[in-house]
Image: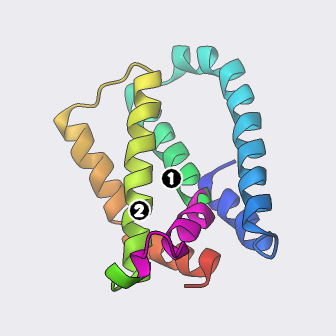
Amino acid sequence: MNWVQVVEIMVTSFGRSSHAITQSWIDWTLQKSKITQLTQANQELTQSRDEIIKEQLERAIGEGITALPYMKEVFKNPTYELNKIVENELDFLLGAVFSSILDRNAMFLLERLVKPTNEEFIWINHFLFSRADQLKDLIRKILEV
């Protein structure tokens, strides 16, 4: 399942409570983790370095996007008063998604014992940031911002 399919699932189930969405995300993540563990050894034998980096980035994007409902809850929490400090909710959420994706990608690559070169980091950043408009549209669609 790629991140676009995950987003479609999130959009169709958005009528459910944030807790239910979060629980669904946790269940999906655990199921995906079990499948990944079973196939990871075989994939490592056949995947090139570029394929590993691309796959892990797609995985990070998918998981970053599925965390959007939680990010919105944090943003809207009156305890933090972020809505008084942040002037543009959509850009704030886009930055949070970028941060989440980059952090997750770094962790996934560490799990695979892959340390990207400077050129690979440039490619990763370009791949991600060149899709800012697409991610903004997904944020609007999922969170109705």
Whether residue 131 is visible:
no
Residue 64 on image: x %, y %: 52, 54
Which SS type dominates the magenta stretch?
A: helix
User: Which residue is at a point 46% across and 22% down the rendered structure image?
Assistant: 112
Answer above or below: position of 14 versus 71: below
Disc 1 marks which amino acid? Answer: Ile
The label nearer to you, 1 versus 2, is 2
User: Which residue is at a point 57% across and 52% down the rendered structure image?
Assistant: 62
User: Which residue is at a point 42% across and 81% down the rendered structure image?
Assistant: 83
**Which region of the structure is painted magenta?**
67-83
Answer above or below: position of 63 versus 42: below
3D distance between C-alphas at marks 1 and 2: 12 Å
Answer above or below: position of 60 versus 51: below
User: Is residue 30 toward the left or the right of residue 54 in the image?
Assistant: right
Q: Hey, which quadrant is residue 57 in on the image?
A: top left
Local crowd size for mark 2, using a 10 Å CA cut-off: few (<14), some (14–19), many (≥20): some
Q: Do the residues labelled 1 and 2 touch (CB within 8 Å)?
A: no
Q: Mark 1 points at which residue?
A: 61
Q: In which quarter of the image is the C terminus?
A: bottom right
Q: Name the residue under label 2.
A: 96
Residue 139 on image: x %, y %: 54, 74
Return the residue nearer the eye: 99 or 55: 99
Residue 43 on image: x %, y %: 59, 21
| Circle 2 SS class | helix
Return the residue nearer the eye: 38 or 29: 29
Disc 2 marks which amino acid? Answer: Ala
Labels in figure, total: 2
